Image: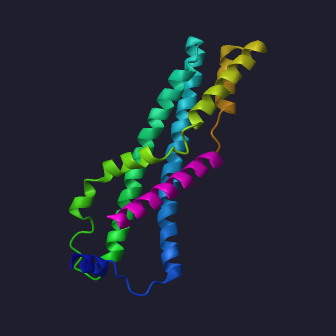
Amino acid sequence: MLAVKRFLNLRRGRINVRKEVNKQLRIQKRLQNDIFKKLQTLYRTQIKKASNQYKTTQDFEPVFFVRETTALTETVMRQHYKKVFSVVYNDNEETYDRGRKQEEVFVFGRSVEFEGLIDDYFRTRTPYFSNVPNQVAISIQNQIQEGRSNNLTLDQISRNITATNKIGRSRSALIARTETHNAASFANHQYHKT
């Protein structure tokens, strides 16, 4: 009897494919734009911070830079994953429970599991952004070595670091697209699995 009830709850009726695709694209685009802006800001501030640190202390610690940037990126991405999971679960609840009384879209038992789902998501795959801080640290080190060999001042080297080590818009957009799509797919799969 429980299996029949569960199956009946997933009944949607006639599906307009174009409407469904457009709805999914709108959701994904909104989520992508949000994380894209946050990633751009994060990487820009980290590079600027490393540049200022080199200008004041004449020292750049690549290991510390990679560790700090990775930790900050993971924090931002965890918040993003939580938002993606919440949007996907809410959308699915709204879609499948249209015929029933709309008390509350969010089911009590599902709200507790997001942290565990995010942990499972991190455990099962390597994030797409994992190598970015290493590449930026290597690039900063190369800029410092090149500046020293050309007898540039600290101020000039610092300006070169910020000018040449920008994470491009296309790279940030690629990370935002990939991570949002993968998280949404994982959340959708987990929703239908439970």
**Image quarter (top left, top right, bottom left or bottom right) of the N terminus:** bottom left
* Residue under the point 34% across and 82% down: 11
Magenta segment, prevailing SS (helix, strand or loop): helix
The image shows residue 88, relative to residue 94, as above or below, that is: above
| Front residue of this view, candidates 174 and 47 | 174
Q: Find residue 163 and report its horizontal and vertical position in percent.
A: 68, 31
Above or below, 194 against 154 in this view is: below
Q: Which residues are magenta?
A: 169-194
Left or right: 120 in relation to 57: left
Farthest-out residue, bottom: 14
Where residue 168 appears, as percent x and y from the top left, is 65, 43
Is residue 98 visible to us here? no
Residue at image coords 70%, 14%:
153
Determine the residue positioned at 55% across, 37% down.
43
Residue 193 covered by magenta stretch: yes
Q: In this image, 170 relative to 188: left or right?
A: right
* 104 magenta-colored: no
Q: Which corner quadrant of the image does residue 137 belong to? A: top right
Image position of 189 with respect to 167: above or below: below
Q: Quadrant of the C terminus?
A: bottom left
Residue placed furthest toward the right: 150
Tell me how the rendering is colored.
rainbow
Residue 122: image x %, image y %? 43, 45
Residue 126 placement (x, y as % from top left): 51, 43
Residue depicted at 26% across the width and 76% down the height = 3
